[in-house]
């Protein structure tokens, strides 16, 4: 069992935001699965992301349980996920299983010149992509509006006063596939307005559990900067130091990765004649699954050490959802040993289906033992 900000996740296993948590059928199957302790939606924007199936694709490695994707965010708007989450929770009033609604506000500046979707480095063609083409919104931070909509849903279910709230939020700050808009978590100045929006909502409602989905980091100073930045938002709540961020999801995919078509499982989307032998039409994408596992373990362990040793009690209460190559019971145990409170799975879900969770919960850390 894992608990943070009054959320109870039993077993401490969830899916992470991914294409296999896109619609009501996906989410219902995940919620009804006895081997998930929580369900995470695919990342939504306020008005939906323009999905292009000829570009936004995923491939699976032929020699490991790894994947490479060039997806953006969900084509469904946040309002649709709110309706779906409402339906799921209304149908299961007896369940305390929480749903983590993953959201983001990926907005470039007005009139910013960014490359076309193709990452063909031999092409010099550029076009002006209006913000409305990216997510149907304008260039301002839409996170406050999104959080307000989720708070309204939480109020419907009495979450702010419940001993067992069922709705949490994840801010995805780490998708590497949004061209012209690098992951905000690699740039504190870009991350600041998003966390500030969370802090303002948290000040009014300290029961809200919000996490940040982080990218893979590769050197020590990055981990320190992120934790110290989050610590700067710690507030006094009823005489205790509490931080508006309740958990970290570590890690998202590793961007700028490449596979050739002879490295992946063939499917109907693989069109080698049009991709020049590359596995994805966009050439580069986000690497996930077993190939990312060692780096994800390192990220979880680095953050756990910093969290445990931090002088700020608000930071010491941060939980970690460990993700990246959690494709087996052994992998889940490694993630717990590295310092995760909950483990998350995406690539294995996409490759093996929902039955993967029955394998993951066989981990001693989940099924009977305690985390080391």
Image: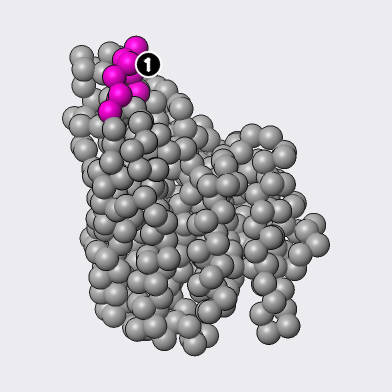
Can I make out residue 82 in this image?
yes
Q: Which residue is drawn at 35% across and 77% down?
A: 153
x and y, in percent, of residue 214 in the image? 54, 48
Callout 1: few (<14), some (14-19), or many (20+) C-alpha neighbours within 10 Å?
few
As drawn, which residue projects farthest toward the front? 111
| Along the viewing direction, whichever of 108 and 14 lies nearer the viewer | 108
x and y, in percent, of residue 129 in the image? 29, 36
Q: Mark 1 points at which residue?
A: 121
| Element marked by disc 1 | loop
Q: What stretch is highlighted in magenta?
A: 118-127
Q: Residue at x 25, y 70 (%)?
A: 83
Quarter that holds the N terminus? bottom right
x and y, in percent, of residue 263 in the image? 37, 21
| Along the viewing direction, whichever of 335 and 119 lies nearer the viewer | 119
Q: Would you say the magenta stretch is mainly helix, strand or loop?
A: loop
x and y, in percent, of residue 92 in the image? 32, 79
């Amino acid at each position: 069992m894992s608990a943070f900000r009054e959320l109870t996740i039993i077993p401490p296993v969830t899916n992470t935001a991914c294409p296999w948590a896109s619609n009501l059928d996906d989410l219902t199957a995940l919620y009804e699965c006895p081997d998930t302790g929580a369900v995470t939606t695919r990342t939504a924007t306020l008005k939906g992301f323009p999905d292009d199936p000829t570009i936004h694709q995923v491939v699976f490695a032929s020699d490991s349980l790894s994947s490479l994707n060039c997806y953006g965010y969900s084509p469904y708007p946040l309002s649709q996920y709110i309706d779906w989450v409402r339906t799921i929770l209304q149908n299961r009033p007896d369940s305390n299983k929480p749903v983590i609604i993953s959201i983001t506000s990926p907005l470039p500046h007005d009139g910013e010149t960014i490359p076309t979707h193709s990452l063909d480095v031999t092409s010099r063609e550029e076009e002006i992509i209006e913000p409305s083409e990216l997510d149907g919104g304008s260039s301002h931070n839409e996170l406050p509006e999104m959080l307000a909509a989720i708070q309204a849903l939480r109020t419907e279910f009495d979450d702010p006063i419940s001993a067992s709230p069922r709705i949490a939020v994840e801010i995805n700050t780490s998708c590497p596939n949004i061209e012209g808009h690098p992951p905000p978590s690699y740039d504190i100045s870009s991350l600041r307005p998003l966390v500030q929006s969370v802090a303002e909502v948290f000040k009014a409602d300290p029961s809200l559990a919000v996490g940040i989905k982080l990218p893979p980091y590769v050197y020590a100073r990055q981990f320190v900067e992120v934790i110290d930045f989050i610590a700067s938002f710690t507030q006094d709540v009823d005489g205790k130091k509490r931080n508006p961020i309740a958990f970290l999801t570590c890690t998202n995919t590793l961007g700028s990765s490449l596979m050739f078509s002879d490295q992946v499982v063939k499917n109907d989307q693989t069109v080698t004649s049009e991709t020049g032998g590359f596995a994805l039409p966009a050439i580069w994408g986000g690497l996930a699954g077993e190939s990312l596992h060692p780096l994800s373990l390192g990220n979880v362990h680095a953050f756990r050490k910093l969290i445990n040793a931090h002088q700020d009690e608000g930071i010491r209460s941060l939980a970690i959802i460990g993700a990246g190559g959690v494709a087996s019971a052994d992998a889940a145990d490694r993630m717990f040993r590295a310092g995760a409170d909950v483990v998350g799975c995406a690539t294995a879900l996409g490759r093996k289906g929902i039955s993967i969770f029955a394998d993951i919960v066989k981990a001693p850390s989940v099924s009977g033992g305690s985390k080391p």
